[in-house]
Amino acid sequence: MTAKGTVKGNIVVLDEGEKLPDGARVEVRVIEEPLSAEEAIKRILSNPITKPLGMLELLREDRKEREERFDRWMKPEPD
């Protein structure tokens, strides 16, 4: 069972029509909205590369991201 909502004041407010049974244990997962091209460019420009990166550093960074976001790499996002 899944339900969607929005966080307001650290409380999850379910979307209209969504219901969960009283006492149900839940797990909350943040759904990141895709960035617009403009926002993506702003983020890239605000974090410039200050030193050359080699392939080893890129592979380490990739591995770290996959370990931190394992659920996003292994499971497709639900509709």
Image (tube, rainbow, N blue to C red):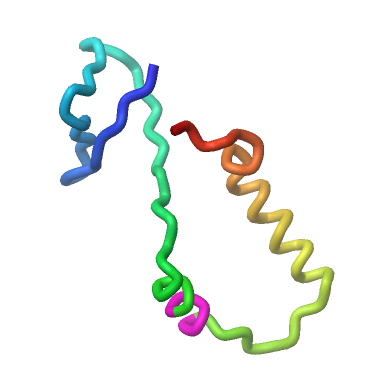
Tell me the quarter of the picture where residue 73 sits.
Answer: top right
Residue 27: where, in percent of width, then height?
40, 27
By secondary structure, the bulk of the magenta-drawn segment is best described as helix
Tell me the quarter of the picture where residue 22 sits.
Answer: top left
- Foreground of the two, 72 or 10: 72
Is 53 within the magenta? no
Q: Is residue 67 above or below residue 20?
A: below
- What residue lies at 58% left-to-right and 42% top-to-bottom? 72
Q: Is residue 46 above or below residue 79?
A: below
Tell me the quarter of the picture where residue 74 sits.
Answer: top right
Q: Is residue 44 left or right of residue 68?
A: left
- Foreground of the two, 42 or 47: 42
Residue 24: where, in percent of width, then height?
30, 14
Residue 77: where, in percent of width, then height?
51, 37
Q: How many marks?
A: 0
The quadrant of the picture occupied by the C terminus is top left
Q: Is residue 67 above or below residue 61?
A: above
The quadrant of the picture occupied by the N terminus is top left
Q: Which residues are magenta?
A: 42-46
Q: Is residue 5 left or right of residue 47?
A: left
Residue 75: where, in percent of width, then height?
60, 34
- What residue lies at 26% left-to-right and 35% top-to-bottom? 5
- What residue lies at 19% left-to-right and 34% top-to-bottom? 13
